[in-house]
Amino acid sequence: MTDLFQSLAQLENLCKQLYETTDTTTRLQAEKALVEFTNSPDCLSKCQLLLERGSSSYSQLLAATCLTKLVSRTNNPLPLEQRIDIRNYVLNYLATRPKLATFVTQALIQLYARITKLGWFDCQKDDYVFRNAITDVTRFLQDSVEYCIIGVTILSQLTNEINQVSATAFLIEADTTHPLTKHRKIASSFRDSSLFDIFTLSCNLLKQASGKNLNLNDESQHGLLMQLLKLTHNCLNFDFIGTSTDESSDDLCTVQIPTSWRSAFLDSSTLQLFFDLYHSIPPSFSPLVLSCLVQIASVRRSLFNNAERAKFLSHLVDGVKRILENPQSLSDPNNYHEFCRLLARLKSNYQLGELVKVENYPEVIRLIANFTVTSLQHWEFAPNSVHYLLSLWQRLAASVPYVKATEPHMLETYTPEVTKAYITSRLESVHIILSRDGLEDPLEDTGLVQQQLDQLSTIGRCEYEKTCALLVQLFDQSAQSYQELLQSASASPMDIAVQEGRLTWLVYIIGAVIGGRVSFASTDEQDAMDGELVCRVLQLMNLTDSRLAQAGNEKLELAMLSFFEQFRKIYIGDQVQKSSKLYRRLSEVLGLNDETMVLSVFIGKIITNLKYWGRCEPITSKTLQLLNDLSIGYPFLSWLLGKTGTLSVRKLVKLSAVQFMLNNHTSEHFSFLGINNQSNLTDMRCRTTFYTALGRLLMVDLGEDEDQYEQFMLPLTAAFEAVAQMFSTNSFNEQEAKRTLVGLVRDLRGIAFAFNAKTSFMMLFEWIYPSYMPILQRAIELWYHDPACTTPVLKLMAELVHNRSQRLQFDVSSPNGILLFRETSKMITMYGNRILTLGEVPKDQVYALKLKGISICFSMLKAALSGSYVNFGVFRLYGDDALDNALQTFIKLLLSIPHSDLLDYPKLSQSYYSLLEVLTQDHMNFIASLEPHVIMYILSSISEGLTALDTMVCTGCCSCLDHIVTYLFKQLSRSTKKRTTPLNQESDRFLHIMQQHPEMIQQMLSTVLNIIIFEDCRNQWSMSRPLLGLILLNEKYFSDLRNSIVNSQPPEKQQAMHLCFENLMEGIERNLLTKNRDRFTQNLSAFRREVNDSMKNSTYGVNSNDMMS
């Protein structure tokens, strides 16, 4: 006993050290000792003693946390009786110790919630022992306020725990393969059996609390009200149908309230309760009330019929009107934010035609407009909330053409006010930001600006003549002031900066409203208005460009590029009517008579930016993106015309400025192409975009003109020769060589991507091979450890071997396909062997230093193997080891990657599984020849990939599994037939390995079947293809699996489930011919539908797929 007390004293001391000490070493030692305690066999008994006799809150916290880990563990779980005892002990402990520290109470409630969730389907004497939550907390709710808070918190935490697809989902049972399925079963059962009772209870308690005139000076009553609101919010925020929506889709969210809850929402007192609470409690509580109202306002439309919905909406709008008439609490940022969300839901969940029929609509839309205008004018207050207000007005404005109601919507009155408030408030903000330190400039957050402008583009097009008149007036004022300041010798830099800031906003907004043009709804008058705006921006551009040699404004330039992008999308291209009034206005004011002249303005701006802003990465990359977009044109029309490049692109190529670029793409003219020793190697990414655009433009008139091609390639030829010269000497400037080579291969990758026709690509291939390929190989050999060098080289090679648009078509007498694969094999082998010498790489650097390069090698090998330009049979026939080397390197690289990493890094998983798909389809003999541990590794990776969230990965795994199963089935069929030719050695060995380890294939059979029956299977066709082979290879196991699933159903459902399985195999023969597979796929669709119908109304336990563990 003395030892026990000493041991408890030591634990208490360790807890104190962990939570109180400031010495890092002491804390780490304490943490290590406590981790060992958690894993010790007597942890459970000592936790109970700590709770009983521990003298500090920290020891109680440790005990609660350890118990939560114990009940959550999957290997060696606690027996049912022990978990029931812990649950009862926790409830008694909370009931007898009301004065516990808050964090201890919270930890114990978390323990109760976890036990309840994980044991939801556990039975004892036909009783679901963990489903009595409301009964469990009744004694708390009937006691004092302190106990009532504990009871409500238990229900709140339980609702939250069951709703969360968190780590707990992965702890349910030993089978962690399908945690989401089991989580949904528990959540659905909880929703159907308990959630509405909990919601009703919380609403009743809120009514009682509000009816008693809460003493809001009493801390405990404060706490009770807060917990009740949290509980109600958790109920309304429950994921009712398993959609797991995230907050990023907040404004589109519909709350899928079950039909059985209708009575609560048809009763207007429920809605009224929350509006009354909002007005009667302090502002600090109001955000939770408003959050509840947001969820209530978002209940699915189909819960009501038309008359009920109109009545519900009327009550909702009345409540909103009352808040707007008494806006004092909205000065709190949290209240304001939630109220903006509530306003947005008025339109995301209801139609304008329904809103205008509400009795108080004219008054409410006036109040909302005034509220929006005031909010926009206070731009520095809660900027993230403005999104919801603009979202409301955007949806209202977009609905105007479709509203059929006779009642006036009055948006023609209020929308211009909102547009004006947004524009003027942004302009007024400029001076304030420049004159005060510490204020954030909204223009710095380009993502937020772009989001708001997208919304404004729709709002501003409503009553467009008013928007346009305002923009013209404000632009003319600012532009005139700006011009006068530039001509004045005494102008202060501050005044110039203010006008540039105002013009930046105006250029952004003009671009946005032009981008909001909808072709079917626009008129000639509106196009003429667009012309007025475009003329002004282009005149401003001429002014600012003329000053770039002295000074420039980066934000204004970015706004110009945003404007050009919108202008290009709407008015440049083969689909635009050139008789547009916009073009007429451009001709009158600026002398731009046709699209060719407008294109010359675009190209002039692009060249100017590249000349003066080459060292400014944001401007350079956006400028090159604009050039790239122009060079693409409209590919569909190009295809129709049967020409290289669309009409607008062909016009582009004829411009002298474009010809200048094609003939002078050197650092002398474009500074960003220079090798600046101060910049990082990764800063050269934009070069690929530049050369992709140039490559497309060159191809328009290139044809078979090799002289023109060689002339274009002269700067790149010189760069390659320079690197070759450096490599030929023993000592050279490594940094210069790296920069030259990285810039060069990025340029070449852009060209290779653009050359998607056979003629042009063959010119590139003959230019680079064999002359310059050794330089790329040498670079990989020298700098394999530096991803800044290897990544661009590997990506170039992956592009060169990619048979895009069938461009790699060699003549029948040409060995180039084989020679190209040899180079590919050499690069993969060299990089692979060297990268494996790196040794242990820190986890946070493993992707950058190792896995990214390996991923590109996998993509490269996949492109080469599936390109259909190499006959791979000739390699072994003529003793060429290129194919073997590449495949063996792939295996070495693969085995160096932990399974978890294959799925943790999306690009790696996509490249690996797509390569594996090609290997299992065309090189199954190679897979069959591998060592048993390698085969098991590959099969395990397929098994894990079947449950991946990425549908592409999952589909690829199905395809791989189908090829492997088909190969196995064929070899088994052959081995049972009397044949004169025996199976080859690889096939025989592969069969032997599979027969030694049947559990791998059986596990995949149960995985696929489980996904089809129990999960939201988004690629059912792909899943069906390997399933037939899996069943035919494991007929006894399939029979046992079927019986297990049938027996797990309630007795009244078993016959229906048995019939579903009978129908699945009806008419299916014992072969894998296409006709038989197609029949099985059809049967599977019917099977899934019938099984879902059968299980819809049954409550089935988690153990329904015990065999699938």
Image: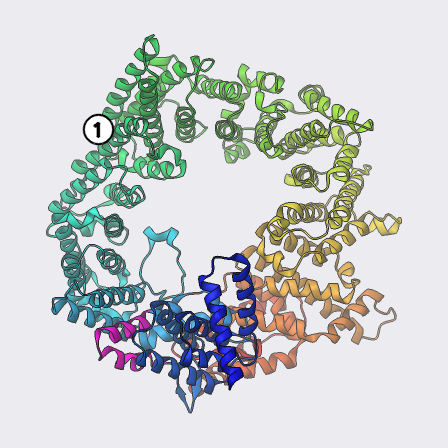
Q: Is residue 963 above or below residue 480?
A: below
Q: Answer with left or right where residue 144 lies relative to residue 763.
A: left
Q: Is residue 139 magenta?
A: yes
Q: Amino acid at mark 1?
A: Lys
Q: Answer with left or right where residue 340 lies relative to residue 921.
A: left
- Can I make out residue 129 in this image? yes
Q: Main secondary structure of the magenta part?
A: helix
Decide which of 603, 1085 is in the foreground and name it. 603
Q: Which residue sits at x=79%, y=47%?
A: 871
Find residue 266 and report its image quarter. bottom left
Magenta stretch in the rendered image: 130-156
Q: Which residue sits at x=53%, y=64%?
A: 1020
Q: Residue 129 in the image: x percent, y percent?
A: 39, 85
Quadrant, the C terminus: bottom right
Residue where numbered disc 1 is placed? 466
Find residue 946 and report its image quarter. bottom right
Decide which of 663, 408 is in the foreground and name it. 663
Q: Is residue 860 magenta?
A: no
Q: Residue 90 in the image: x percent, y percent?
A: 38, 79
